[in-house]
Image (spheres, rainbow, N blue to C red):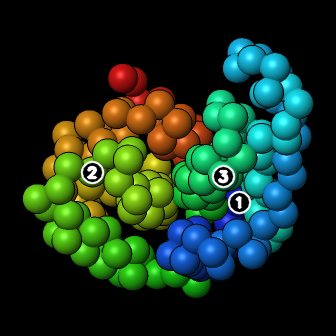
Amino acid sequence: MHGFKILPQGAYPFLLLDEKLLVKQCRMDTYTASGPGGQKRNRTYSAVRIIHQETGLSAIAEESRSQTQNKQKALQRLKKIIALHIRAGPERTLQELNQDGQQLFLQEASVKINTRNPRYPLYCAVILDVVYRQDGKISEAAKQLGISTGKLNKFLSRDKDLLVAANRLREYFNHKPLKL
């Protein structure tokens, strides 16, 4: 198994949704979490598992004693998981992906793109889709995105999960994995 799913429009429809609408597409389970946090933690249903119905992907958060905070964290994690595991099908043209990627980099030129940026999952999805369309070749993907190979490598290597997803794509196309 290659670790990703192909959907006609990729992850974009889910990542661009307002959070309230995304939550409506999900099933949420609450449960008691084990571990540190005192007696209250083990008696309240503060841990959250959120499952996206359409993709079957899920995320959990249980580090806070607040169910609301855990729900927010699980939703953020779910967005990233969707970005890392859903690739755009052939319906989404390379030209569209290029435009998305170039617009993202131009719009955020003065902003450091890091994992806390709310648009970070969208960046991940665009980049991984372009890498997928370029048969796992990082230099070709960088050209398509209008950035240097070094900048793309640096972006991929800053996030372990993103690097693992990129390496899954590279493995799928029989390329050696990227290293940190």
Task: Tell me where residue 75 appears, x and y as whole percent.
Answer: 63, 56
Please name whichever residue, 61 or 99, is drawn nearer the observer in this view of the structure: 61
Q: Which circle marks residue 68 in the picture?
A: 3
Asked if 22 appears above or below 61 in the picture, the reply is below
User: Which amino acid lies under the numbered mark 2 shown in the image of this protein?
Assistant: Ile
Front: mark 3 or 2: 3
Left-right relation of 39 to 162: right
Q: Badge 2: few (under 14), some or many (20 or more) residues near its Cα, within 10 Å?
A: some
Tags 3 and 1 in contact by the CB under 8 Å rule? Answer: no
Task: Tell me where residue 157 appears, x and y as whole percent.
Answer: 36, 33
Residue pictured at 78% horizontal, 67% vertical? 26
Task: Tell me where residue 65 appears, x and y as whole percent.
Answer: 69, 34
Front: mark 3 or 1: 3
Asked if 91 appears above or below 6 in the picture, the reply is below
Gap between marks 3 and 2, in whole Å?
A: 26 Å
Q: Within the image, what quadrant is residue 101 found in?
A: bottom left
Residue that numbered label 2 is attached to = 113
Element under disc 2: loop
User: Which amino acid lies under the numbered mark 3 shown in the image of this protein?
Assistant: Thr
Q: Which circle marks residue 94 in the picture?
A: none
Whichever of callouts 2 and 1 sits on the residue coming sooner in the sequence is 1
Q: Badge 1: few (under 14), some or many (20 or more) residues near its Cα, within 10 Å?
A: some
Task: Tell me where residue 7 appears, x and y as whole percent.
Answer: 68, 72
User: Which amino acid lies under the numbered mark 1 shown in the image of this protein?
Assistant: Lys
Residue that numbered label 1 is attached to = 5
Gap between marks 3 and 1, in whole Å?
A: 30 Å
Element under disc 3: helix
Please name whichever residue, 138 or 110, is drawn nearer the observer in this view of the structure: 110
